[in-house]
Amino acid sequence: MAKPGLTAMVVAAVALVVAAVALVVAMVAKHAHAEADDPEKVDAWFNGLSHADRKTTRLHFYFHDTLSGRNPTAVRIAEAKSPTGFGVVNMIDDPLTKGPEPESPLVGRAQGFYGSVGLESMALHMSMNLVFTTPEYHGSTLSILGRNPALETYREMPIVGGTGVFRLASGVVTAKTYFLNLTTGDAVVEYKVIALHY
């Protein structure tokens, strides 16, 4: 049986995490959003699918995950003590750029969270939307949900959906670390996307 004080602390910790997530979601909504179509337009689009050909889009960009400094783009929302970081969760609103340099042109943002899920090895669970801001894909998103064994050279994660230009998307994203600061955790990761969509 749990001690009353311990139960109250767990409830308070859960409430704090929920409040932090709600605050981050509200802040993210101000900075990037995907525009939804009128439901009748979406219905008409679906009705035309039987005659539509599937398209393949290939994208290449860099993901900048910054935990340090005055303007971090990744914020820790759950802490844990484990050799592999098991249980740590970070909420992100990371810039996606054309090149690896921070001043490279912005192509979108990665918004969501990742958490450490490996008890015996370093592995992340990634749940994020790639929200594109370039004229060709403005407001369109790709949803990524999968395991990221972050210390391996190449990682592959599934595309599980999309909106806008990428409606009904599937496909894969491959990631390769371009830069990693072992002291701060800041990283730049090269992403290559192959998305199938209508």
Image (cartoon, rainbow, N blue to C red):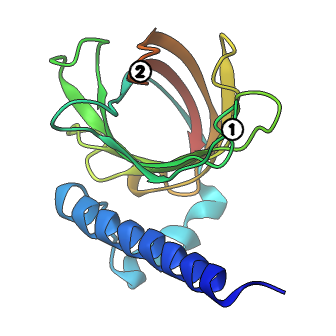
Q: Which residue is at the front of the view, 34 or 77?
A: 77
**Residue 10: x, y in percent?**
60, 76
Q: Is residue 61 left or right of residue 133?
A: right
Residue 44 in the image, given as x and y percentages of width and height: 47, 75
Number of marks present in the image shown? 2
Q: Is residue 4 above or below residue 45?
A: below
Residue depicted at 66% across the width and 90% down the height: 4
First-in-chain label (1 vs 2) = 1
Q: Residue at x 55, y 78 (%)?
A: 9
* Residue 198 seen from this side: no
Q: Amino acid at mark 1?
A: Ser
**Residue toward you, 42 or 144:** 144
Tag 1 residue: 82
Q: Provide residue 5's location: percent of width, then percent of height.
A: 60, 84
Residue receiving disc 2: 187
Q: Secondary structure at mark 2?
A: strand
Q: Does 123 sit left or right of 142 as displayed?
A: right
Asked if residue 85 shows in the view, the reply is: yes
Query: Which residue reaches farthest bottom?
Result: 4
Quick one: label 2, few (<14), some, or many (20+) residues within 10 Å? some
Amino acid residing under circle 2: Ala
Residue 6 left/right relative to 34:
right
Q: CA distance from mark 1 to mark 2?
A: 21 Å
Q: Is residue 100 above or below residue 15?
A: above
> Which of 153/10 is in front?
10
Q: Residue at x 36, y 51 (%)?
A: 140
Q: Which residue is at 55% across, 70% downward?
A: 46
